[in-house]
Amino acid sequence: MSSILFIVFLPLAAAIIAGLGNKKLGFVPSKVVTTGALFISCALSWTIFLSFLNGSAEATVVPVLQWVKSGDLDFAWALRVDTLTAVMLVVITSVSALVHLYSWGYMSEEPDQPRFFAYLSLFTFAMLMLVTADNLVQMFFGWEGVGLASYLLIGFWFRKPSANAAAMKAFVVNRVGDLGFMMGIFGVFLVFGTVSIPTILHTAPQVLNGSTIGFLGHRFDTATVLCILLFIGAMGKSAQLGLHTWLPDAMEGPTPVSALIHAATMVTAGVFMVCRLSPLFETSPTALAFVTFIGAATCFFAATVGTTQTDIKRVIAYSTCSQLGYMFFAAGVGAYGAAMFHLFTHAFFKALLFLGAGSVIHAMHHEQDMRYYGGLRKHIPLTYWAMMAGTLAITGVGIVDVAGFAGFYSKDAILEAAYAKGTELSHFAFFMGIFAALLTSFYSWRLVFLTFFGKPRWEQSEHIQHAVHDAHGHGHDDHGHDHAHGHDDHGHHDAHSDGTAGYHPHESPANMLVPLGILSLGAVAAGFVFHGAFVSEGTGEFWKGALVFNEHLIHAMHGVPDWVKWAPFAVMATGLLIAWYGYIKNTRFPAAFVDQFGFLYRFLLNKWYFDELYHFIFVRPAMALGRVFWKVGDQGIIDRFGPNGAAWVVAKGSKAAVKLQSGYLYSYALVMLVGLVGAISWVIAR
Amino acid sequence: MSGFPILNLMLLVPLVGAVACLKAGREQARMIALVTTLVDLVLGALLWANFDTGGAQWQFTERANLFAGFQWALGIDGIALLLIALTVFLMPICIGASWNSIEKRAGEYYAAFLLMETLMIGVFAAQDLFLFYIMFEAGLIPMYLIIGIWGGADRIYASYKFFLYTLLGSVLMLIAMFWMVNAAGTTDIPTLMQYNFPPHAQTWLFLAFFASFAVKMPMWPVHTWLPDAHVQAPTAGSVILAGVLLKMGGYGFIRFSLPMFPEASAQFAPLVWGLSMAAVVITSLIALVQHDMKKLIAYSSVAHMAIVTIGLFAFNTQGLEGSMLIMLSHGLVAGALFLGVGVIYDRLHTREIDRYGGLAINMPYFALFFLLFTMASIGLPGTSGFVGEFLSLMGVYQESSWVALVCTTGIILGAAYMLYLYRRVVFGEQKNADAAAMPDLDAREWAMMVPLGLVTLWMGVYPESFLAPMRKDIALLEARVAVAAPKGDAQVKKGAAKPAAEHEAAHGEAH
């Protein structure tokens, strides 16, 4: 299976060529190299995935190079391919290839295209290194590599202060999680004496059985400490409650980036990690309970915030955060297969939603505020249908025991597993999940109705006004340098009373629509086609031990009461109805609701005030402490009583500073001389 | 190559060059200096190529009795080899960095640099206690001169501070050396490394050496000379200060404190850990609020050196090897960062962060290199910064989870201050016309950046090249310190083997 070498390293080579060649290489060659590399990787990945699907492939490890060998610690660069990796391979390379292609159109007006494509390919390489890791340190390499690429891509429009701030925030908040990950690796090495994943997983039940460890002055269950530390890393990367604040801000990056990194692949790395290490997590019920709780809480929290956001990308970002919560509590209750299945389907429909949103933004001349959309269905029909497919998939539309869209299979599997697990916490997660499903349906349909239905509300948008003015030849474009340009060929000159301001949105070019079409196919069919492989009884065959596959749980899932099976459908329909009532039937209803529940609205609109809180308890104190340590500590105390105090004494005996300087040298030389004379006389006299 | 006095030659070549420079004009002097340092680089490469990895502990030994028991004794082990390699690698780059920026008294300037090279190699190669002492202390004199004569506006104060701090430590160390030679009856360092000093004597011997090494390192709270020295020093001075001179403290700990006073090292480990933890947190926070680029990087150096000290005092292989790798990596990366600052300082003549901005627009390749070194500084895996930091922290985790936790916060704070710097200098809008007009790297600057960048990546991807030469020496050191090493706080206890049925029940519950 040496094709894995090509899958992983072709994107790296492409990134280097496009990145270093940059503008000298030219736009088209750099785009061809990167996109071509990704499509090759993608084709090879599907070959591997299909061979796992039909059961003809076995897990293998392809060694690459020795990395570090220090005492007992020994790890190498190596590429591991098993079922879990194969699933991730197709997700990563497919979405990445499509996003590369989509970017041909979306970024076509961008003067820095080679840099953009180089970053995308670099990201893909790092993500592939992450999922093929055979040891924890290589996983950490990929982990940090995707963090770097994410940082660069969020800050791609580096002139924008908000993009820079968001990029930095993403990196630093992720590093908080990485602290946990690193401590987890240290702990694993201490306990197991190795960082090799297969060895750890193989020996975990024996090594950790009842074992305790001293940590920060207390004694804990070893497995719990290790798993929670590692999970903190997952929380950072997957934007779980507490460490989620970077993800919405990351929407400052170009939209294809949001689709690839902040929806389909990088943010799912935490889920992948928990599944990859599932035999380890299984040794600690406490850690699994923690995972379940955090997942359920995130899924609820993010969904509530998603209902109030007006920026189309931020709605989808909170939606991503919420869906990741589902995956985590699925893992927490032991349904790792369901978690991976949701990861798989989510990658397609969420990438689709983001790319669709990008197509809308493209058509609306960079306007991202849904309050200024409306009535776009007729203007950009293909985008509309793609978004519909995505929305049907994420809200989980489908008929029990018949058929449905992708999210129907994966989300229902998670909810059923949570119910079937039967503990108090899993029931808590179940109800959180059901409520979040209601909210998911509401905010997803709200997005669709605000964007595609109703009357155009475009004239209030500054971006649209700019576009119209540009077309009229007055005013100048003062914001466009950092965006891919939309359409400037608008012909109408009259003032319009229909809310369009005379603006005509255009459907996106083919290179953007083709990826939308392919992903729509995934959003419609991925659940139906693959649920048998991922979450049916007897699919331990498919996973082949790549993760813990709990046959009992799968069995119990099928035995859940009918109301549990139908609950997701009911809340989905309810959410749709509320959204329909509020945004189509009676459009004054949302405002009235906000008037009545102003506090709740502001609380949600301000994202539960997490940013404000963190700014108050972390950012400002860090800066203030820095100044205190510097001005008071270093200068006020150490220098004042140290060298300056001494200088004051010395200066009393000498007026001229210049003389002083040479004076030091002489006195220093003198001390050395005296010392040496002393040494010599002592040696001679001995 | 047995018998060929390569170490002597490596000391002699820069010394001859220094004398030649003294009398030469600017153009000749810099050419002499460049050729001399390149010759030493070639000799260094030969040294490494002929070093027998896994062979005798001390190689290339050269001895000459001078008088009355004093010896001109040279010889290297893997640890010294790596630090010598670092020195000869950085020197031509320093000369390159000074190429256009040094105008006054250029001959003397290059002479000072070449003299310093001799003395630095001498420090790492010395096998006689007093020879080491002379090299160690004299090596700082050219540095005083470089700061004091070719430095910035406040150079007098900076060189004074530098002097004052180092003076105190070295006097105490000298006294301790006398006592040691008296007790052990030899000045031979390899012998002393095997000598067992009585534990009560170790205590104050350790403290005397500690006074010197802690200042050189520098450890908190005796670090305040470093930011001033860096800020005032010319670019090349900063590069060599961060690149090699700071490593003398760490080398001192590895060569003297740990092997000669293992019991005392274990006894004082909590002190070292405490100071290092304080350094990581405090100096990182200070770095966050700096307005001066060089000061920021200087404070970050203190934080990085603190990870070196906790790795050394972790008393295990990962910690020791990690510390060595951080020293090498920091030498490259901090050197490269100062070089980067020098590149833009040469164009705009200010170190104020706020005067820059948007350099990615007019200096894209500079932005690329600066990004690489920024990422290496914050320890991104795949760069040299990661491997050492990771090993060091992993080493200390085996001793104390608290120390590991506090020091690992350095990865968060480090990311914060370095990215904040990068954001203000390289990203954003072009705020000032003069900064916006700066040209990208020229050929000379490319020639300096590329080798640094390549080695940074090499050390990150395949650190085995750098681990292999020192493996045996670290193992010997580890064996010597492990005896006295404190027990870690983890104390993993296997559970009383539960009956299988109960275990099953616990699992069944999860099903």
Image (cartoon, grey):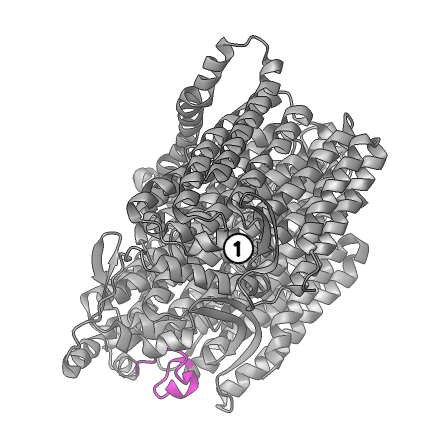
Q: Relative to residue B460, is residue A242 depicted above or below? A: above
Residue A547 is inside the magenta segment: yes
How many neighbours does mark 1 have within 10 angstroms: few (below 14), some (14-19), or many (20 or more)? many
Whether residue A355 sits left or right of residue B235 in the image: it is: left
Residue A174 left/right relative to A79:
left
What residue is disc 1 on?
A: B325
Q: Estimate the x, y position of residue A211 in percent, counting from the top left.
A: 22, 69
Residue B493 is situated, as x and y percent measured from the top left of the image, at: 22, 67
Q: Residue furthest front?
A: A685
Say left or right for A199 vs A389. Answer: left
Q: Is residue A378 visible?
A: no
Name the quarter where the C terminus of chain A is drawn. top left
Q: Amino acid at mark 1?
A: Leu
The residue at the point 65 percent across, 35 percent down is: B237
Q: Nearer the viewer, residue B154 or A331?
A: B154
> Under tag 1, what secondary structure?
helix
As displayed, is residue A68 above or below residue A87? above
Q: Is residue B130 above or below residue A670?
A: below
| Camera-nearest residue between A375 and B224 | B224
Q: Main secondary structure of the magenta part?
A: loop
Boundaries of the magenta span: A534-550
Residue A151 among those drawn in magenta: no
Question: Is A342 situated left or right of A676 in this image?
Answer: left
At a point 39% along the width and 58% down the height, the residue shown is B395
Determine the residue positioned at 20% across, 79% down. B508
